[in-house]
Amino acid sequence: MTVSSCLRLALVLVVSMTLASCITGGRRGRYTQAGIEELPMRAEPAAMFLAGLDTDLDGIVTRQELDEALDRLWASADANKDGSVSILELNNWRQHWFGTSDGWPGQFHFDTDGNSLITRTEFDNGIKAIFDDFDRNRDGKLERSELLAAAPRHGQSQGDRETDRRQGDRGDLRGGGDGP
């Protein structure tokens, strides 16, 4: 390829990209006919964990299903059966149930008194708080739509996503992130 051919090809690419940007108004992604951006959806590790508690496989996790799972979850967290969960045990439990020991919910979500040992009460309250965080309409059950969140926009940091989550913006396109 000659230099002039390369320059022509580069010019064609630049013009094409400029025209595409003009046509879409500089927007990326998919849009509805009304011009509303359709964001890709994702499920956080905690959402996948909660979905796994749906014992009757009806696509809805109820508070009763959550309560029925607490003994089993505690037994798996208190690996050495000493009546409390150490930080190491919690990290191992999170790795098993959430697929990662990093991110939310972390140690202080469960260890509310900060003594590095998690009691059964702290553990149960932490699990229930995870459920409550996803229960956007506060009806005591989690539908799959409540477990999904809009995928972060390109360039949004992990800290921004966690701040959004703590402030109630789960990216739920139905609720607009303002909560019930």
Image: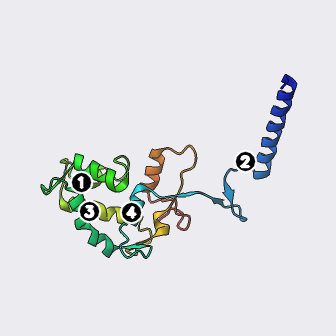
The residue labelled by disc 3 is 73
Instruction: Nearest to the eye among marks 3 and 4: give it.
Output: 3
Q: Position of residue 94 (x, y in %)?
A: 31, 52
Q: Nearer the viewer, residue 99 or 109?
A: 99
The part of the image, by quadrant, that contains residue 167 is bottom left
Above or below residue 36? Residue 9 is: above
The part of the image, by quadrant, that contains residue 131 is bottom left
How far apart marks 1 and 3 lie (CA) works out to 18 Å
Crowd tier of the residue under label 2, counting other residues whose Cα lies within 10 Å: few below 14, some 14–19, many 20 or above: few
How far apart marks 4 and 2 lie (CA) works out to 35 Å
The residue labelled by disc 1 is 112
Q: Earlier in the sequence, mark 1 or mark 4?
A: 1
Element type at mark 1: loop
Q: Amino acid at mark 4?
A: Asp
The residue labelled by disc 4 is 133
Q: Earlier in the sequence, mark 3 or mark 4?
A: 3
Q: Amino acid at mark 3?
A: Leu
Q: Amino acid at mark 2?
A: Gly
Q: Earlier in the sequence, mark 3 or mark 2?
A: 2
**Could you tell whether 77 is left or right of 63 in the image?**
left
The residue labelled by disc 2 is 26
